[in-house]
């Protein structure tokens, strides 16, 4: 499965789908799922839903992975042909200078003052997005416009997926968050639920506010909603596993028991926690229990949709999050697949997630 997952991920990472224009991803997913699901529908907000029905009635389980990636947007075109841009999602300004980018299928580079002319302070202080520009090699705004470039066009980073260290299971590239989750969902499309309805939801605009997930949960009102995403690790020299984050690469999927500062994003439903730990134990997949104060994922929006949804998440560890080179261990993704396959297999005996159901 490792090689198939790597191939899927490589193909998906090559697609540019900045938040707000996930259409290229939806087209690719629709083609990949043709003939594998009972239906594939896209709502007006840009969510894609792949639905598989079991042979008999039963519960509805929704598993979500977001399709969008962080990036840039054309803000203005200067008379000399340089493009000013805005950031979309959690872009790190310091990583932008001299970065290759792509817009309208055309390659460019993010320009910055020549190193020979930077002051000592400029060389070490980092750069703000407002100070930078995109160079398409055009000498006038008219030349840029002749390429079809307009204000509001999305701009993606160019960082093809590469193998890391010759280990065979480590990869890095742009948009691993969350093309890796989407790749796992494509593998899950081959699993038929024993009963009920399985919804694989490919959600829009997660990077800018978890927007699509709320609509997905309200549309299907699932008995259980799970977000499959990636998350940072605490296993690099600039992090501390005990003080910052006790998640490591290769340690298996992470189970966030709390997300957001003080739990403001999500506090994991205790019965969902018990269920996922039980399923993971049966599948012999280790889960990394963690609190994640620096972010959240689609489960936070789904939990409070409609009149409340039993929701949680599985997250695949990745290093260098929200950079154009995110590093992941495919073995962790295989672990997430095995847990989710176990969840689907339990749909004919899905527990009640009423808050006091275990009384």
Image (cartoon, rainbow, N blue to C red):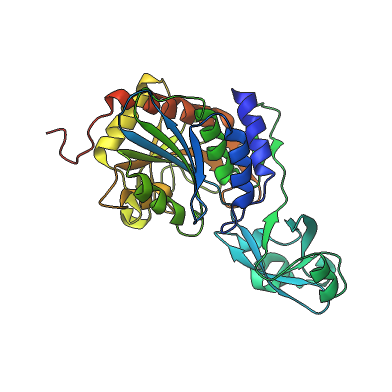
Image mark count: 0
> At 69% across and 60% down in the image, what residue appears?
96
Asked whether 246 or 168 is in front, the reply is: 168
Asked whether 270 or 167 is in front, the reply is: 270
Residue 302 in percent (x, y) is at 36, 49
Q: Is residue 131 above or below residue 179?
A: below
Q: Which quadrant does the C terminus fall into?
A: top left
Residue 99 in percent (x, y) is at 74, 57
Give the left or right position of residue 208, taking residue 260 as reference. Answer: right
Q: Is residue 99 visible?
A: no
Residue 77 in percent (x, y) is at 75, 75
Give the left or right position of residue 150, taking residue 292 as reference. Answer: right
Asked whether 169 or 5 is in front, the reply is: 5
Q: Is residue 6 visible?
A: yes
Q: Is residue 99 above or below residue 256?
A: below
Task: Determine which quarter of the picture holds residue 34.
Answer: top right
Give the left or right position of residue 153, taking residue 310 as reference. Answer: right
Give the left or right position of residue 272, taking residue 118 as reference. Answer: left
Q: Is residue 314 above or below residue 2?
A: below
Q: Which quadrant does the N terminus fall into?
A: top right
Residue sticking out furthest to the bottom: 79
Residue 245 in percent (x, y) is at 44, 45
> At 62% across and 45% down in the image, what residue appears?
27
Asked whether 312 or 170 is in front, the reply is: 312
> At 37% across and 48% down in the image, what residue appears?
219
> At 84% across and 68% down in the image, what residue appears?
116
């Amino acid at each position: 499965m490792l090689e198939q997952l790597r191939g899927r991920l490589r193909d998906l990472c090559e697609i540019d789908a900045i938040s707000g224009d996930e259409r290229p991803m939806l087209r690719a997913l629709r083609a990949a799922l043709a003939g594998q699901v009972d239906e594939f529908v896209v709502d007006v907000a840009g969510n894609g839903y792949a639905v598989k029905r079991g042979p008999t009635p039963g519960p509805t389980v929704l598993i979500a992975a977001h399709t969008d990636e962080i990036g840039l947007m054309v803000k203005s075109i200067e008379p000399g042909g340089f493009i000013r841009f805005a950031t979309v999602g959690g872009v790190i300004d310091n990583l932008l200078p001299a970065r290759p980018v792509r817009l309208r299928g055309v390659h460019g580079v993010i320009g910055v003052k020549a190193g020979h002319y930077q002051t000592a302070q400029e060389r070490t202080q980092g750069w703000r997005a407002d100070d930078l520009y995109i160079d398409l090699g055009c000498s006038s705004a008219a030349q840029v416009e002749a390429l079809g470039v307009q204000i509001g066009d999305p701009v993606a980073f160019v960082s093809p997926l590469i193998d890391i260290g010759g280990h065979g299971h480590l990869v890095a590239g742009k948009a691993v968050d969350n093309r890796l989750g989407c790749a796992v969902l494509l593998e899950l499309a081959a699993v038929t639920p024993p009963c009920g309805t399985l919804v694989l939801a490919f959600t829009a605009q997660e990077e800018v506010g978890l927007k699509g997930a709320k609509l997905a949960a309200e549309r299907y009102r699932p008995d259980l909603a799970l977000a499959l995403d990636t998350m940072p690790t605490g296993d690099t020299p600039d992090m501390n596993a005990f003080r910052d984050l006790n998640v490591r690469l290769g340690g298996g999927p992470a189970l966030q028991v709390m997300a957001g500062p003080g739990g403001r994003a999500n506090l994991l439903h205790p019965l969902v926690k018990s269920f996922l730990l039980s399923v993971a134990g049966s599948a012999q997949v280790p889960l990394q229990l963690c609190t994640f104060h620096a972010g959240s994922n689609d489960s936070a929006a789904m939990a409070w949709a409609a009149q409340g949804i039993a929701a949680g998440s599985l997250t695949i560890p990745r290093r260098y999050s929200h950079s154009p080179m995110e590093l992941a261990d495919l073995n962790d993704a295989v672990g997430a697949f095995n847990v989710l396959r176990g969840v689907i297999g339990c749909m004919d005996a899905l527990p009640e997630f009423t808050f006091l159901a275990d009384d």
